[in-house]
Amino acid sequence: MSGQENRMKSFKNKGRDNQEMRRRRADVSVELRKSRKNDQLLKRRNVNVDDEPPSPLQEQKQTTAPMSIAEIVQALKAASNTRELFLAVQATRKLLSRELHPPINEVIEAGIVPKFKDLLDRSDEPSIQFEAAWALTNIASGTSDQTRTVVGSGAVPEFIKLLSSPHKNVSEQAVWALGNIAGDGPDMRDFVIRSGIIPPLKALITPETPAAFLRNITWTFSNLCRNKNPAPPPEVAVAVLPTLVELIHHCDTEVLADACWALSYLTDGTNDRIQQVVASGVIPILVKLLSCGEVSVMTPSLRALGNIVTGTDEQTQAVINANALGGFRGLLESKRTNLCKEACWTLSNITAGNVNQIEAVCESKLLKPLVAVLNSGEYKCQKEACWAVSNFTTGANVQQIVKLVHAGVVGPLCDMLVVKEAKIVMIALDALNNILAAAGQLDQKSKICSMIEEIGGLDKIETLQTHSNESIYEKALHIIDKHFPLEDEEVVEIMPQTNEQGTFQLNVAQSIPAGGFNL
């Protein structure tokens, strides 16, 4: 089974040829991997700055020439007092804190890591603990192999003990190191969790915790929630959600952003994992943050809400009930491509819901801005808008499809028939087929057919009969046979009478919006 087929079978079923319409985060996982540096860093290196203050308890800042690695190794062996040891450790840290090309491999190959791991236990010399922890943090910020060298030395239990250090600079550096290790991947994340990080990490959060320290703590929590295949153990969400609920009310932008990222990771999974987050009560504050004006916060807030609406109708309804749709017009019109794309993706999962949820999208006056994205947005936004529109036409009632046509959707849908991505062509064809079927129920299919033909849509559908993708060929052939028969096979349709306003008077049992199919 191909990746695309497997992905589609994991969505919520709404009957589109046995393919499901809800689209989980795996749908855009490749793109997310490409852009993750813009979202949130997996690892962070602590680099030197020009005005770097002396390390705590340091007598004076070093002014001598930097030591080489060979000199450092010799100094570590020959150190006869605490001062000499401190200077050797600090020299190592400074080498590893260079902004460009830090010699991480050279330090590892020199056998320094085990020595520094042992120095983490020097509670009698917190300045040495701090410098050693900083150096190991920067090694752990490197490649996976470099991170594993730190873990293999036995540093993780030592770092966890340092979380309770009375010296805040030491405990903060331990937080940073553990965050880098947890960010390496699922196995390192779970190793850090099993080693007991969560209780002492939570204990560091108090009303007196400085904002800078709290940022590192929150980022480390986000790395404990990050990654799938496998996802974090279910008990992790139970343990960290109360803390995240607290952090998401903080006033610091970086703390808010990382707390929202953590929630977005926890919601990127099965419905029972989504429910854990829903039950925590964070949805209203996530909705509020959508309009905070800080893109670094809005992006993960929207992503978390978008993940929630991939779940059940009840979970989707919880987002709608929090008035999330009220802020979507601004997101759809945002000049930030990623915000617009995420908003369309989220709407595609809401329009995959029930008729009442589709009606909520209509009542929020989102159809015209959604169609505007489909018409003239960047392609990756158009793609998601096309999904949203196609899902809408699959689950909507006839009255709702009338509203969508009134919003001008037919032309942009026809334009999507010439894109290179076969899946998008297919869902555009699905949407047009659904609109034509609805028009047929209203005895107005000829008018929609004429519109499609006049804007060149019929030519595009006919061209698709030679498409290399068999499903597209079959769908195009079906639409032409069913809705555009040859003239000598056409059945004459009785055109409805016009009313006093000049619009068509529809003779159907359903209640149609005033003005009818005023196209």
Image (cartoon, grey):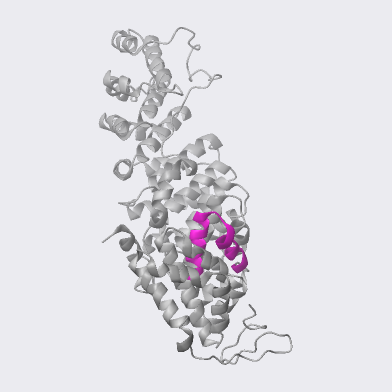
Specify the farthest residue to the front: 488
Q: Is residue 254 above or below residue 154?
A: below
Image quarter where the C terminus lies is: bottom right
State the image coordinates of residue 297 (x, y, percent, origin top left). 55, 48
Camera-side residue: 443 or 286? 443
Residue depicted at 43% across the width and 18% down the height: 94
Q: Is residue 424 above or below residue 85?
A: below
State the image coordinates of residue 236 (x, y, percent, origin top left). 36, 51
State the image coordinates of residue 392 (x, y, percent, origin top left). 50, 72
Say if the magenta span includes residue 369: yes
Q: Is residue 263 above or below residue 196?
A: below
Residue depicted at 46% across the width and 83% down the height: 486
Q: Main secondary structure of the magenta part?
A: helix
Q: Is residue 349 visible?
A: yes
Camera-side residue: 270 or 423? 423
Drawn side of residue 149 relative to residue 68, left or right: left
Using the rendered view, name the quadrant where residue 321 is placed.
bottom right
Image quarter where the N terminus lies is: bottom left
Say if the magenta span includes residue 405: no
State the image coordinates of residue 154 (x, y, percent, origin top left). 27, 31
User: Where are the magenta residues, as a range?
Assistant: 367-391
Q: How many marks?
A: 0
Q: Is residue 314 visible?
A: no
